[in-house]
Image: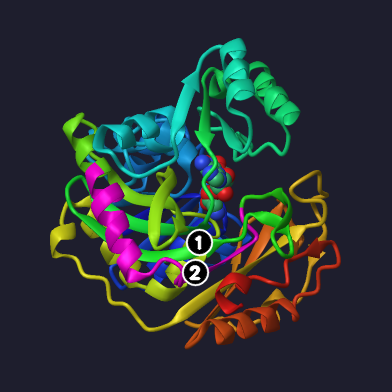
Amino acid sequence: MNILVLGSGGREHALAWAIMQNPKCDRLICAPGNAGMEAIAECADLDITDGSAVVAFCEEVAVDFVIIGPEAPLAAGVADRLRAAGILCFGPSAAAARLEASKAFTKEICDAVAAPTAAWARFEDVDAARRYIADTGIPLVIKADGLAAGKGVVIPETLDIALDAVKTIFSNYGDAGETVVIEEFMEGEEASFFVLVDGETCLPIGTAQDHKRVGEGDAGPNTGGMGAYSPAPVLTDAIARQAMDEIIRPTMAEMARRGAPYQGVLYAGLMIRDGRARLVEYNVRFGDPECQVLMMRLGAQALDLMLACAEGRLHEARVTWADDHALTVVLAAQGYPGAYVRGSVIEGVGSCPEDSAHMVFHAGTARENGALVAAGGRVLNVTARGASLQEARDRAYAMVDRIDWPEGFCRRDIGWRALR
Ligand code: AMP
Ligand code: GLY
């Protein structure tokens, strides 16, 4: 079959890499892609949030199956447009993608089924929000309701910062900041839980832990994620069952009941404490870089699972689990998540092994005159698999050490929570 992957990050390179290993894939196209995807698939220049353009492209090149990587095309309704045109697609409708696009919507769904999550309140008015904060005090968490490119969450250290934060969200965040959600601060350890949902059946496909802060020991500002590993030992089988029973299945049933059945991968951010999980947030896509470690472990069966999901056949699907571990280290441009320079040359990637246990996935990369250059903040995802997390980590950092990129940096402590 002809398959189109939408997106240009490390997540989509990892998806493309897994799909290519499955004999069902005859032709793979990535849009817009990056230098890593160019090496294993065709790349097409396409505005992936423009549903008409995506449908026209699929009809022109006879695409059989579309896999949507990032949230923006999902929130823009690209999956709806594809399905309306009769094209098989992996990813939720715009109505179901509200689980990521609106934090207040997700909280309402949780309340409707009594799913464990932080207590919350919503505000459309800055003065009411500031009065609430002054009455409640910190700790609390302040969130812009809409998609704010990962910048919409503030965990204020002082009351003044909290009061300023609501003002900033209301005045600077456009549509994303018309509503502010204020939540109870949950203590605990965070982990990511990935579940395929075909409207009815929910099938867990793995756990992972991200490293959101830029600095070692989880210090410094938040990023898109500086590294990840799978599985996440903190998310035990018992906690996964509790999360399925109390959070995932009830909320998915509520979405179906409201006429917006969910189809695609559901990424539940969970806060774990005293052997129980509470929902931090839903994302309607794979995590990046969590997808890289999940794909490393799932390999070619990832395509079969995504197909079963898109075709409503998850009840007959099975995940073949290996007793293995994967870890990915993000190499980012110096300055990230603040301002950084593009265009620096990266050498040594070609000297890294590429096999079922080693892979350098590309995020923000491009080719210029034959050289590999940095073209984004997060640039490479050096990923390895092993019989233990320690082995996966040793393999990943051995590859990192082969890469010659003075303008880049990485965290040296990916995996520390699980290995401590
Ligand atoms: P989000 O943009 O919703 O992923 O939030 C970013 C991060 O803020 C999460 O990954 C958590 O680390 C943290 N966070 C969000 N909500 C809460 C909460 N209610 N309690 C504690 N931490 C939170
Ligand atoms: N790594 C976090 C995310 O993809 O949202």
Name the image quarter holding residue 87. Answer: top left
Give the label on residue 290, or none: 1
In the rendered image, residue 405, in percent from the top left (x then y), is placed at 81, 68
Is label 2's Cβ within 8 Å of ligand 2?
A: no
Alpha carbon of mark 2 to alpha carbon of mark 1: how far? 6 Å
Few, some or many C-alpha atoms within 10 Å of disc 1 (few <14, some 14-19, many ≥20)?
many
Name the residue located 60 percent from the left edge and 56 percent from the top edge. Answer: 34
In the rendered image, residue 94, in percent from the top left (x then y), is placed at 35, 32
| Residue type at tag 2 | Val
Q: Is residue 366 visible?
A: no
| 191 horizontally vs 23: left or right | right
Is label 1's Cβ within 8 Å of ligand 2?
A: yes
Name the image quarter holding residue 275. Answer: bottom left
| Residue type at tag 1 | Glu
Q: Is residue 332 visible?
A: yes
Name the residue located 21 percent from the left edge and 58 percent from the top edge. Answer: 308
Q: Secondary structure at mark 2?
A: helix
Task: Reply yes or no: does residue 4 show up in magenta.
Answer: no
Tell me: residue 204, above or below residue 325: above
Tell me whether circle 2 and circle 1 mark residues in contact (CB < 8 Å).
Answer: yes
Which residue occupies the foreground of this view, 376 or 263?
Answer: 263
Give the label on residue 120, or none: none
Ligand 1, image quadrant it occupies: top right
Q: Give the residue number, with chain letter if any, for mark 2.
A: 293
- Name the quarter where the C terminus is drawn: bottom right
| Magenta-colored span | 225-250
Tell me: residue 197, above or below residue 367: above
Which residue occupies the foreground of this view, 105 or 128?
Answer: 128
